[in-house]
Image (spheres, coloured by chain):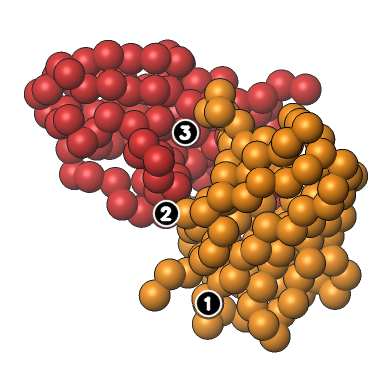
Amino acid sequence: AQKITQTQPGMFVQEKEAVTLDCTYDTSDQSYGLFWYKQPSSGEMIFLIYQGSYDEQNATEGRYSLNFQKARKSANLVISASQLGDSAMYFCAMREGLAGGGADGLTFGKGTHLIIQP
Amino acid sequence: AAGVIQSPRHLIKEKRETATLKCYPIPRHDTVYWYQQGPGQDPQFLISFYEKMQSDKGSIPDRFSAQQFSDYHSELNMSSLELGDSALYFCASSQRGAADSNQPQHFGDGTRLSIL
């Protein structure tokens, strides 16, 4: 089974609109972390936002917020007031087993290609 | 702010050759991670090092090896290169602490390896 599922391969959004990128995850661990990264066409991988499994409040970073619904195992990224520069591939990722060390590597979803239209 | 530095940015090799990729982590970061991203794919975790010791191992082929040096830089050594090794190779770094769960992995710009 996929550990990270991103159901939207591609999205077109009008500039200035808000956009929600979906991410669901699968883990039996109680302690884990969820990350979102942005990958522009130039290829670099840019960290956007983090949510810990025990965090009670949804994470926010500027125009980015994470809608964390633990019972539904979802961690959707919300981008407010989208800009042309937001056009990129967006990856949701998870790090499991944080209690007592656990795994180092991030497991990524397949990504969502977001295109912002003027 | 200083970022993760990877070299070279681009590398072209032929089948059965060897390649060495280098990674210089963000200052004071003690953990280094290597990922491989094939064309149109998501990144796959290869291996990580904490304080110069191998910390975790992912889907790294036996033909590949890596190490972290005393100055915390890391090298990924690849031998007997195959066409399927053509990919973008990322190095990432983080600072592991008591609450390392919330320490994001910061990625370098990657090395694009092409095998002819």
Q: Would you name the residue on which mark 2 appears?
A: B56
Q: Nearer the viewer, residue B12 or A8?
A: A8
Tell me where residue B4 appears, x and y as whole percent: 60, 26
Q: Name the amino acid type tagged 3.
A: Phe
What's the CA distance linking mark 3 and mark 2?
16 Å
Tell me where residue B109 appears, x and y as whole percent: 55, 25
Query: Residue A27: which disc?
Result: 1
Q: Which chain is red?
A: B
Q: Residue at x 64, y 78 (%)?
A: A73
Q: Nearer the viewer, mark 2 or mark 1?
A: 1
Q: Which chain is orange?
A: A
Query: Residue B90: which disc?
Result: 3
Q: In the shown orientation, is residue A6 left or right of residue A17?
A: left
Q: Report crowding for label 3: few under 14, some 14 to 19, many 20 or more residues within 10 A (C-alpha).
A: many
Query: Residue B43: which disc?
Result: none
Q: Name the amino acid type tagged 1.
A: Thr
Q: Name the amino acid type tagged 2.
A: Asp
The relative height of residue A96 versus residue A114 in the rendered view (above or below) is below
